[in-house]
Image (tube, coloured by chain):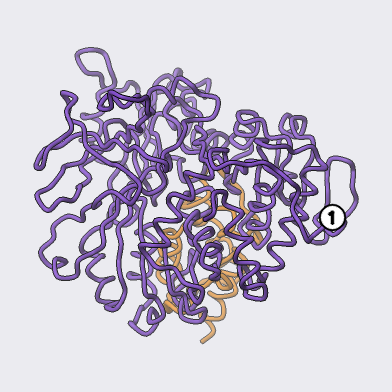
Chain colours: A purple, B orange
Amino acid sequence: MAYILQQLLSKSAKTYPDKMAVWARGRSITYRELDERSNQMAHLLRKLGINKGDRVGLLFPKCVESVISMLGVLKAGGVYVPLDPQAPADRVAYIIGNCGIRVLITNHERRAALNSETLELLECCISTDQGENGKDGKLVPWSHLAEFPADHAPTVNLIETDLAYILYTSGSTGRPKGVMLSHQNALTFVEWCAEEFQVRNEDRLSNHAPLHFDLSVFDIYNTLEAGATVYLITEDLALFPTSLANFIETQGITIWYSVPSALMLLLLHARLTQDKLKSIRTILFAGEVFPMKYLRQLAEMAPWADLYNLYGPTETNVCTYYKVERGRLASLEKLPIGIACANTDAFAVTDDGRRAAQGESGELYVRGPAVTYGYWADPEKTQKMCVPNRFEQNFEEKMYRTGDLVTVAEDGNFYFQGRRDSMIKSRGYRIELGEIESALLSHPGVSEAAVLAVPDEIVGNRLRAVVSLLVPDSLKAFDLQQHCATRVPKYMIPEFVELCLELPKTSTGKIDRVKLAAEPVLAH
Amino acid sequence: MIEQAEVKDRIREYVVEEFAKSKGINQVSDQEVLTKNGIIDSMGIFRLVAFLEETFNVRIGDEEITNDNLESIDAIERLVISKAKK
């Protein structure tokens, strides 16, 4: 039984050395090649001073090298940090500083976009560009891997509770927060998936989610676990539903996992026929609420496929699941988030601190080996979210507060009701409205700012900002969007920015969000 | 009928006003890959297609909504012109 993630690869590389492991952008590598390249990467990282527990950043668009790099970092004993290749330089700089990344695997284009302070922090960059040459001491070309041993990885004494990767998500106080995940956290989920979805050697999995998004953990590691093949979907495919449908058909994808909005896009614009999806046997979705109307359409388009609604914040990966019961599809008004996964305990706690009984609502708490230790270098936030399990008298244990309000229904399933705070979802991305407000307020000309979510059937939510300026008419909406672009990822920049003289207030002097939300959205 | 030279200007203006500006970008080169750098997202593609159909009086089929046809202002111009000639 594997207790660290890279053992999944070693096992499959022995059993299926010549099988295709990863496909991306028309290129592919076999299990043997993936094993050998990641061994070489591990040796290179060791030579660059990476030791057990050291963080290594990955900043480049999805490609075969992404998977080599992830496994290479783990084999060196390190912790990989996948960064959004579209994130602004300021956010990348923050993350690199926050978790002390000294070695970054990146490409020429992304390296050129880093700011000078970030380059100062980095001891070395490894370039994924095949053609790149010239070692200036701080830049190692990919071709340099060939100089290291391929047949074995460096010796490291890793145990399952060591960290494997850190995923950064939106933080309410204006800066992203790094969710720390151990080998055990990931493997608890991977092993449950392997059993529940019976991933097999002949399966072809798609990887739709970006690698800094936890959905990709299933795509990559369950592929390695089963000796299957993963097809990385890049943006030139993801944005074009017809191309994507053709891709699914041509590659014969058997297991699909994505946010619901990606599936809705296929349903609405790909001229889908049952034929296009005929290879798919299992469709998994997570990250946001799937409207029933579209789920019914999907069920009709793939009548033979098992459909699963997976639920869970990054801090727990997936903690509950619901296997869609086709017989209930017509009558079901709302999709359940289901029941706890194996080796995971999920329960609702009422406002007065009791475990919720059937029919009651409360905040969902999760305990078990899939749950994060907390946030990198942020003990305060960790303490707030990972709290002592007060229901256990005999030993000390932590449980994670999801901040999600759920109902425990008569059918035994949990149903998602809403959030306790101002976190929202858009296209499956977690967005803390407070992080965007902080970005707006950091502009010297801004006096007040409120960001509101405008519900949208397809993408979940769109973003609208209402801002008052210190000097009226001194700035335009675009100036503020441009300012946000330097601080937050593109999916967090408000689509609508309205300027006003003063924001409405409640009797206690707080910004009146209820009143703002009731106002019509002005066209931009 | 819109002049050929005007086609690219209209496309560029629309891409900048409708997509780039709300992402904090005010200049887009004709070769820039709009899909790679996040200027246009998945929903934006369909707004763009609706704009092209209406403005240039062309019909763009779902199967033509591909990266090759829409990845840059240059590519979009080529698509529109090839359609208008038919």
| The quarter of the displayed image where residue A270 is located | bottom left
**What residue is shown at x 57% (from left), y 42% (from top)?**
A165
Q: Is residue A453 left or right of residue A143?
A: left
**What residue is shown at x 32% (from left), y 36% (from top)?**
A402
Q: Is residue A363 left or right of residue A15?
A: left
- Location of residue A265 with respect to A486 vertically, above or below: below
- Residue at the disc numbered 1: A148
Q: Is residue A12 left or right of residue A245?
A: right
Q: Choose between B33 and A84: the one closer to the eye.
A: A84
**What residue is shown at x 57% (from left), y 59% (from top)?**
A8
Residue placed furthest toward the top: A508
| The quarter of the displayed image where residue B74 is located | bottom right
Could you classify mark 1 by the number of other residues whose Cα lies within 10 Å: few (under 14), some (14-19), or many (20 or more)?
some
How many circles with numbers are drawn on the protein? 1
Residue B22 % position (x, y) = 48, 45
Q: Choose between A115 and A153: the one closer to the eye.
A: A153
Is residue B59 shown to the viewer in this render? no
Is residue A51 shown to the viewer in this render? yes
- Location of residue B71 with respect to A120 vertically, above or below: below
Residue B27 % position (x, y) = 61, 48
Residue A111 % position (x, y) = 73, 45
Secondary structure at numbered mark 1: loop
Name which residue type carries label 1: Phe
Q: Is residue A192 left or right of residue A250?
A: left
Residue A347 % position (x, y) = 24, 39
**Please, which chain is the residue tagged with disc 1 on?**
A
